[in-house]
Amino acid sequence: MAIRRSRRRGEPCLFIDIRYTAKDGRSIRFRKDAQVQTMAAAKAEEKRYLSNIAQYGSPYEPIAASASSNSIEADDAKSFADVVDEFRQTFMVARLKISSRKGYDAVLTGRLVPRFGALPITRVEARAAEELDLELVKRKLKLSTRNNVQIVLRSVLRFAAKRGYIPTVPVNMPSLKQTGQCVLEIPSDEQVAVLLAHARESHRCAFTLISDAGLRPNEVRALRRRDVQLRYENGEPVGGFVTIRQGWSHGETHTPKTGQREVPISPELARVLAREMHGDRDGHVAVTHRGTPWGQHGLAQAFERVMKQAGLGGWSVYCLRHYAITSWLRAGIPVHVVQRMAGHVHLSTTQRYVHSLKADLEDAARKIAARGRGQVAGPPSSLQGTASQRYFGG
């Protein structure tokens, strides 16, 4: 057990770390930031947790049993930790994609199990959830973080209700907070061209799959030569289709959110892919300069390096996918077709890009009006013909 100094969001803090053995013999590690950031106060807080562990078998005092008519006695109820173990082995494996499982695991391990693990599942109710949310408020965590904690807790409680471990999901759980949408960061045609010009050949293949075909990074990592059908004219690659069958994340392959889909190949992408099509049909299309498949974080790290070399900044590799989707809309492709090409589950996701496009069009209208008055010369750079040329060869 220890109190150690750490940092959160660039600020110093004190961190409590306690290991103990539960009454059923399980080894448990309880970790959290101290509520008061002085060493004396942190030691007092640690002492309180140790006293609760000795008395109750949990760092927190048991919550008084609800006056509601619970048909499951606390002595017979599974512990929250037991339900979480079952939740992980069943629901999370069967229902969540790997990246979501990682997020759920982080919340369960870092926040929920340390707080509620030793409690009977019947005693994890709305009051407990409210107290947890209040603690997160005091720690000045983002609304999105608070929402994620409550979403995972609700999922566990719904699972427990379906399994009959609690009579019903508790009422009056904390409401999810409105967080607002983030503004999409979308590079211009010129900026993407500069980025690709600075990328080495192996990087250029991966980046162009994202910027032209809108693949997610996990889909780039999983793409095989058999998934690419190039079309040639007069011996030159001019188009074709790429079939997205799988994604690869955290060492596991998975089917994309909307199942398999096909995306047309632009002339630029066709020329890049043609150089990568010699070899085993099951071989990876996009590989590192060493000829090995991209790892979990390799693409993002390579993108950051190339951005720096190109004198650009402010984007992640995922912004290339935003660029592709916006380019399709600028080229006049119907929004429902773009939804299918992008692999969006909900049309509302695609429509976010339509809003960005409207901002471009409003800007263009202002510049056209100004040019008519002799104030501005030349077309707006963001709406030059590059996007339509990219997909229709015009």
Image (cartoon, rainbow, N blue to C red):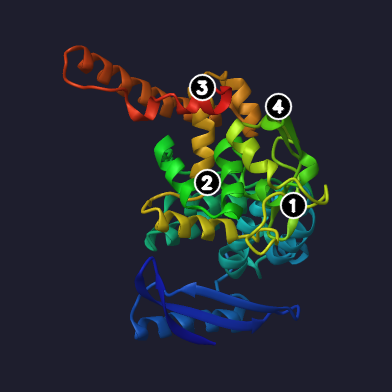
Label 4: which secondary element: loop
| Residue at image location 73% in from the left, 78% down from the top | 26
Q: Amino acid at mark 1?
A: His
Q: Which mark is residue 318?
A: 2
Left or right placement of residue 240 versus residue 11 in this view: right
| Helix, strand or loop status at disc 3 | loop
Q: Position of residue 322 (x, y in %)?
A: 50, 38
Label 4 amino acid?
Answer: Asn
Q: Can residue 71 be seen at all in this image of the molecule?
A: no
Name the residue located 42 percent from the left edge and 25 percent from the top edge.
357
Question: In terms of secondary structure, where does tag 1 sit?
Answer: loop
The tag on residue 331 is 3
Counting residues from the start of the chain, the first of labels 1 and 3 encountered is: 1
Of label 3 and label 4, which has the lower sequence position?
A: 4
Q: Mark 2 or 3 closer to N-term?
A: 2
Observer-nearest residue: 335 or 28? 335
